[in-house]
Image (cartoon, rainbow, N blue to C red):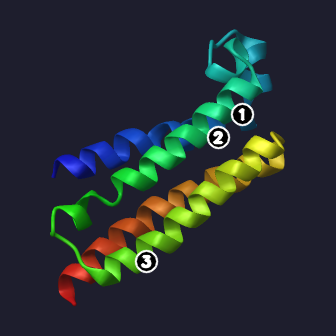
Amino acid sequence: AWYLFALIFFWTPVHFWALALMIQDDYRAVGVPMLPVVLGERVTVMQIALYAVLTALISLMPLLLGELGLVYFFLSLALNALLILKSLALYRQPERRTAVSLYKYSMLYLALLFVAMAVDRVL
């Protein structure tokens, strides 16, 4: 169960900071000190990329602990590859469009990763 906590803990910055990039002008206008407002887009997208990689690595913990098998492995591999690719796309082009894409995918990523865990346990 600790890996589920760790997974959500490291996934949260990817999701939350992508949202913060999307609406950073609103945060700036009302004086909310969010990461993109305080340290800028470049630092934010670097942190997002780092946390995306950490999230992907943590998602492998159930495999290393022997709790899940090949079904989860292959599904998580695809989900993690896309998470990292979208975070790198945001790093290369820190625009609202790429932030929205990562933000939306991050929700789908977590939901599908949990589905993959359940499916693997059933099969």
From the viewer's perspective, is 78 left or right of 9? right
Give above or below for 13 relative to 99.
above
Give above or below for 105 relative to 16.
below
**What residue is at 41 percent from the left and 41 percent from the top?**
10
Q: CA distance from mark 3 to mark 1?
A: 28 Å
Q: Residues within 10 Å of mark 1 (few under 14, many from 20)?
A: many
- Type of amino acid at the residue the image marks with label 3: Leu
Q: Residues within 10 Å of mark 2 (few under 14, many from 20)?
A: many
- Nearer to us: label 3 or label 1: 3
From the viewer's perspective, is 101 left or right of 17? right
**Residue 18 circle label:** 2
- Type of amino acid at the residue the image marks with label 2: Ala
Q: Secondary structure at mark 2?
A: helix
Across and down, in percent, residue 87 comes to 65, 49
Across and down, in percent, residue 107 comes to 52, 57
Q: CA distance from mark 2 to mark 3?
A: 23 Å
In this view of the protein, which residue sits in the foreground, 67 or 109? 67
**Residue 120 circle label:** none
- Residue furthest top as drawn: 31
From the viewer's perspective, is 105 left or right of 27? left
**Residue 75 circle label:** 3
- Type of amino acid at the residue the image marks with label 1: Leu
Q: Secondary structure at mark 3?
A: helix
Pointers 1 and 2 in contact (C-beta within 8 Å): yes
Q: CA distance from mark 1 to mark 2?
A: 5 Å
**What residue is at 68 percent from the left and 24 percent from the top?**
43
